[in-house]
Amino acid sequence: MATGGKGIKGKKITLKVAKNCLKVTFDGRKRLDLSKMGITTFPKCILRLSEVDELDLSRNLIKRIPESISKFQNLRWLDLHSNYIDRLPESIGQMTTLLYLNVSNNRLTTNGLPVELNQLKNIRTINLGLNHLDSVPTTLGALKELHEVGLHDNLLHSIPTSISKLPKLKKLNIKRNPFPKAEESDMFIDSIKRLETLYLVEEKEMCGACLRKCQLAREKLNKIKSTALPAQRKAIFSSLVSPNSMAKESQEDWRLYPTSSQSSLKQKHEDKSANRSNNSEEEKP
């Protein structure tokens, strides 16, 4: 999470500097990119560029976002990540054109999230990760257009049901929060239930087309599983040339000797065998 930010003199942003930072995106939208410029105070001069579609103030040293930010009435994309913000202004609820809001890696607490966030009826993505949230405002459950929600790396112990039941939610990142183990298990089960409903029937009760469809799905699943699981590797003995009967008599020697010495080792074992044979001849009466 962001740290520091005290006693640092930031770069002064003038209207001329801001205008030089205006860019046009590939889809023709106006973006004001003031990221990574060492800004400590929100530059009020940029309010005169309120017609921009996207505003990037990420990776700076900003502590406060003023209420006047609501003057960006056309803003669709607002990136404030990696600053020192501990509270969002109530007026943010007036920015109803917002589709994307990133305030991750700041100092936000639950009290720093205004109720007015529930007025962002068109927002698709909101990232609140890497902050100090100990609970999630249930008002976020009113944002029915949300597709992605980032709540990772906070102090959360639970997620409101209203969040997990958002009708268009596709991605919910809640990693690295101090959830109880049971809570994590329940949330996983709930997410599976939301993705599909499973019905069990006998094959004889299915039509030919449905049966074939299920068989193809099973084959596809088995294929995925087989490629996902690492193949079991057989034990490899780098110095064991061939596991013949001679090697079995002295396995450790065959493992320890280098490959280049296998011929001499083989001769060694042949000599041993010959000696045993001669000894046997001598012992015969």
Image: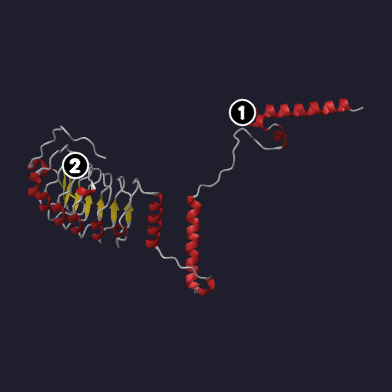
Q: Residue at x 37, y 62 (%)?
A: 194
Query: How is this picture coloured?
Result: secondary structure
Tag 1: residue type? Answer: Pro
Instruction: From the top left corner, tell me how far across and down residue 191 is, in percent.
Output: 37, 58
Q: Secondary structure at mark 2?
A: loop
Instruction: From the top left corner, tell me how far across and down residue 74 is, in percent.
Output: 13, 55
Q: Nearer the viewer, mark 1 or mark 2?
A: 2
* Residue toward you, 285 or 87: 87
Q: Is residue 32 left or right of residue 251?
A: left
Is residue 51 at least partly visible in the picture?
no
Residue placed under numbered mark 2 in the picture:
35
* Residue toward you, 171 or 272: 171
Question: Marks 1 and 2, how far apart in space?
Answer: 60 Å
Tally the marks.
Answer: 2
Label 1–label 2 contact, CB within 8 A: no
Is residue 133 at least partly visible in the picture?
yes
Q: Is residue 98 above or below residue 236?
A: below
Q: Residue at x 80, y 26 (%)?
A: 275
Q: Residue 284 is drawn in which quadrant?
A: top right
Instruction: From the top left corner, tell me how far across and down residue 106 is, in percent.
Output: 23, 43
Which quadrant of the rendered structure holds the C terminus? top right
Q: Residue at x 41, y 52 (%)?
A: 182
Q: Is residue 66 above or below residue 283?
A: below
* Residue toward you, 113 or 265: 113
Q: Is residue 129 left or right of residue 32?
A: right
Which quadrant of the rendered structure holds the N terminus? top left
Residue placed under numbered mark 1 in the picture:
258
Q: Residue at x 24, y 56 (%)?
A: 140
Q: Residue 269 is drawn in which quadrant?
A: top right
